[in-house]
Image (cartoon, rainbow, N blue to C red):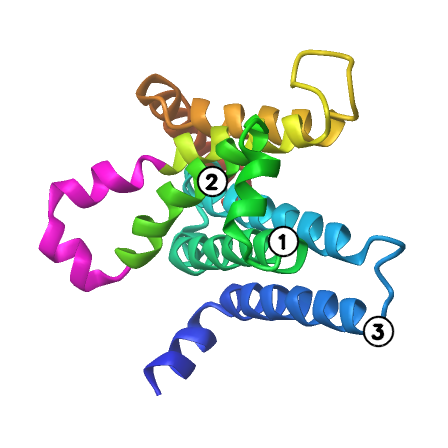
Amino acid sequence: MKFVDGLKKNPLSVLVHIAAWGLLAWQAGAYFSNNLGVNPVQALTQHLGKYALIFLVLSLACTPVNLVFGLRQVLSLRRSLGLYTFMFASLHFLTFIGLDYAFNVQFLWQDVANKRYIWMGAGALLILTPMAVTSFKWWMKRMGKNWKRLHRLVYLAGVLVIVHYAWAKKGDLFSLQGDVRQPFVFGVLLLLLLALRLPVVRTTVSHWRSRARQRWAQISRPQSA
C-alpha cells in the first residue's frame, strides 16, 4: 500500500519505471527477434550503455531541476534513477563479457588488456556498485556523513562514463577523430550539472528564483478597484 500511495503522490515515478522496463523489454524483444542489425550483440551492448548514461544524467539532474524550478517531486526520483543506471550499466557489462566473450576470462583479458575505454567503463561500474548497494535508508543511517561522501563519487563515475563513451567511439572529447558528438553533448550536460552544484551558483540561482516568485506574485495579485 505504501508503494501504491507513493506512486499516487508522484506520478513521475510511474514514468521512470515504465521507461526503464519498457526500454529493457524493447531491447530484449529486438535482440531475440533479430532486429538489431548485422551485429546484434554490439548493438545491444551499445544501447544498454547509452541507457545507463541517460539515467545517470537524469539522476544527477534532479537536484538542479529542483533548485532552478522548485520541483521538489523530482528529488524522490534520484534513488530509482540511480538504481536503473546501475541496472543498465551492469547489463551493459554482462552483455559485453557474456555474449561477446562467453565469460572466457583468458580470451577477454588478451583482447581488452590494452583497450583503455574498457578500463574507464569498468572503473565507473566499480563506483556505481557500492552506491547502488548503499542507496537505501538503512545504509544512509548506518553510514552517516560517509554516505554523502560515497555518493558524491557519482560525478567521478559520470566523468569516467563520458570518457569511456568517447574513447569507444574511436576518438576523444576534444578531437575530430571518431564520432564523438553524442559523448560531447553528454559531457557538456555533466559539466552544467556540476556547475549548478557549486555553492556560489546555487546561491545565485536561489536568489534569482526568489525574486522571480516575488515578481510573479505581484503580477498575479488582483488589482484593487
Task: Find residue 122 and name its label.
Answer: 2
Q: Quadrant of residue 147?
A: top left
Task: Find residue 74 and name its label.
Answer: none
* 117 magenta-colored: no
Q: Alpha carbon of mark 3 to alpha carbon of mark 2: how far?
A: 29 Å
Foreground: disc 3 or disc 1: 1
Q: Is residue 134 above or below residue 144?
A: below
Q: Alpha carbon of mark 1 to alpha carbon of mark 2: how far?
A: 16 Å
Q: How many marks?
A: 3
> Label 3's element?
loop
Dot 3 or dot 2, earlier in sequence: 3
Residue at horizontal 60%, vertical 46%? Answer: 54
Asked whether, in this view, residue 64 is left or right of residue 181, the answer is: left
Amino acid under label 2?
A: Ala
Q: Residue furthest bottom?
A: 1
Dot 3 or dot 1, earlier in sequence: 3
* Magenta residue span: 136-153
Mark 3 and mark 2 residues within 8 Å of each other at the beta carbon: no
Work out which quarter of the rendered image holds the C terminus and state it.
top right
Find disc 3 in the rendering and name its residue. Answer: 33
Amino acid under label 3?
A: Ser
Q: Position of residue 39 (x, y in %)?
A: 83, 53
Work out which quarter of the rendered image holds the N terminus and state it.
bottom left
Mark 1 and mark 2 residues within 8 Å of each other at the beta carbon: no
Find disc 1 in the rendering and name its residue. Answer: 101
Q: Position of residue 140 (x, y in %)?
A: 18, 54
Q: Is residue 167 above or below residue 87?
A: above
The front one of 139 and 112 is 112
Amino acid under label 1?
A: Tyr
